[in-house]
Image (cartoon, rainbow, N blue to C red):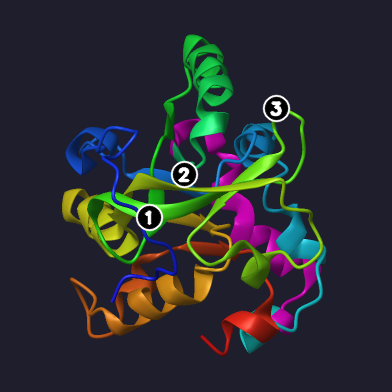
Amino acid sequence: TPCCEAAASQTPIMPMPSLATLFPPTCSKVFIDGGSNLGESVDSWYAGTFHRCSLNQPTRLYPRSWKNASAAEKRQRMLPLQDRNSFCVRSFESNLFLMPALNVRARALQSAGRDVQFVGAMLSNTTSPGQPRHVVNFSHAATGSTATTFRFRSVHTTLPVLADDVKSIPSLDVRNVVRTIVAHDPGAVIALKLDVEGEELYLLDALTRAPSSRAPGSLICEVSYLFVEFHNLHVNLTH
């Protein structure tokens, strides 16, 4: 079932993106950024520094093979990500207030020859032209807002809430995104970042339960690199 604690009746405020347009057959290497914010991850990706966090962070959430690997072995595994300009970059943002600045950033990157798009939609475990989303202002600054499907306090416990409005936002099922890419190229390299304000467990569960389109196993095995920011785990693990 869709992850949802909000309710909205208004028509969607952003157009429904097309998977076929976002992920053409030429995209055999893809960086999927599930949470643009201000474009920091995309900038870090093109600077070649995006994956450094996984080389230096505590290993409690990593598989045993990664924990036991040497620093040289970890760098070797991350080596394909250094060929960053050969990747199609698709960055998803469900906060409509951030899209104008992201569109300006996209045009600048595209003029430099980068295949990058900032997509006004949310990565989810369902595809819908309009999924309810809390758009919360926690600051008077132009960038002081975020969009969540969970109630804001279930994700962020300390930020102030100046305004909370429910908007209808397009969503794309992360499973369909992965299937579209590997349908074009079974050997595709997929780097997936999930920064989805508490929904990461829903998406990981969906990818794990869905069967792979190739060998026995789950669809999550089609993802080459997985980067996740977990939010308020003591709350979200109980939902």
Residue placed most toward the observer, 106 or 169: 169
Q: Nearer the viewer, mark 3 or mark 2?
A: 3
* Residue occupying image coordinates x 76% and y 58%: 53
Comes first in the chain, label 1 or label 3: 1
Asked if residue 87 is among those painted magenta in the image, a careful observer would answer yes
Circle 2 is placed at which residue position?
A: 94
Could you classify mark 2 by the number of other residues whose Cα lies within 10 Å: few (under 14), some (14-19), or many (20 or more)? many
Circle 3 is placed at which residue position?
A: 142
Q: Is residue 30 above or below residue 212?
A: above
Q: Is 42 on the left-hand or right-hand side of 3? A: right
Q: In this view, does 86 lie above or below 130?
A: above
Q: Find residue 236 and report its image quarter.
A: bottom right
Q: Find residue 77 and report its image quarter.
A: bottom right
* Residue occupying image coordinates x 70% and y 66%: 74
* Type of amino acid at the residue the image marks with label 1: Pro
Asked if residue 69 is among those painted magenta in the image, a careful observer would answer yes
Q: Is residue 226 visible?
A: yes
Q: What element carries label 3?
A: loop
From which residue to which does the magenta span run? 67-89
Q: Which of marks 1 and 2 is in front?
A: 1
Q: How far apart in space, not on screen, are marks 1 and 3 (Cα)?
A: 22 Å
Q: Could you say where residue 148 lies in the image, as x and y percent from the top left?
A: 53, 57
Comes first in the chain, label 3 or label 2: 2
Q: What element carries label 1?
A: strand
Q: Find residue 187 and report its image quarter.
A: bottom left
